Image: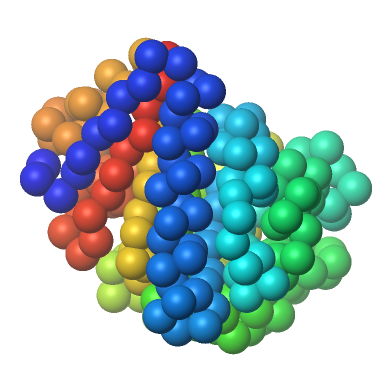
Amino acid sequence: MSNVTTHSFTNCGAQAVALAERVATQLREAIAARGTAVIAVSGGSTPKDFFARLSREALDWAKVAITLVDERWVPDTDERSNAKLVETTLLQDAARAARFVPLYTGAPTPEAGLAEAGARIAALPAPFDVVVLGMGEDGHTASFFPGGDHLAAALDPHGTAKVLPMHAPGAGEPRITLTLPVLLDTRALYLLVSGEKKRDLLADVRLGLADAKNHPVRAVVQQDRVPLAVYWCP
């Protein structure tokens, strides 16, 4: 699709540097234009190098708000917490001055914390300046998991919810996720992926092959609201 551009790198270090430099430029431009910048990022292992590089970029981090596209419903003391990943890899060096807006609220379930998490997202300036998504080998992005109990509502392009809980066979813990309309309400959208299997899956999704119709990432790849830049490394 013409709405998708792919940037391929020979190694993941180069991928991290290139994306960090691009995102830092956009955050600087946002601060210059509007006085603030908002970025929503993903968890998992893929963005660690990107976070480390971005944290050392020179910009006015005190004017940047960082949130997550989704979260496992665990406290930030848990090794699987996306907040913990952000706190230990992105909120370092110069980026320590940024404001972090977590999705986990401490409530016993994502359903119980939904209102507070939604209010936190609603309080951020919109549109976001940057959204960085990842993708699993099952074709999920954010917490849009195949078989998720709120998947249809989360992917509804006309939905009004900002966040939704998600329980799915492949999700492990209960989760909370920003919805598709919130993720697409951004000035810049990235998909950060690594590995040949994910590259091939994305190619199938872009071609609209039958097997790819069950991959939730298709909602991001096949939309025409905001251009998508894919950053891929082996």
Front-most of residues 117 and 3: 3
Q: Quadrant of the N terminus?
A: top left
> Compared to 15, does 224 lie above or below?
below
Instruction: In the rendered view, tell whether residue 194 sits above or below residue 44.
Output: above
Query: Colour scheme of this structure image?
Result: rainbow
- Residue 78 appears left or right of 226: right
In the figure, 45 relative to 171: above or below? above
| 52, 221: nearer the viewer | 52
**Residue furthest toward the right?**
77
x and y, in percent, of residue 140 in the image: 44, 39
Residue 166 position (above or below residue 53): below
* Left or right for 76, reference 206: right
Q: Residue at x 16, y 59 (%)?
A: 224
- Lateral position of residue 37 relative to residue 115, left or right: left
Extreme residue in the front direction: 58
Quadrant where the C terminus sits is: top left
Residue 51 visible to an observer of this rendering: no
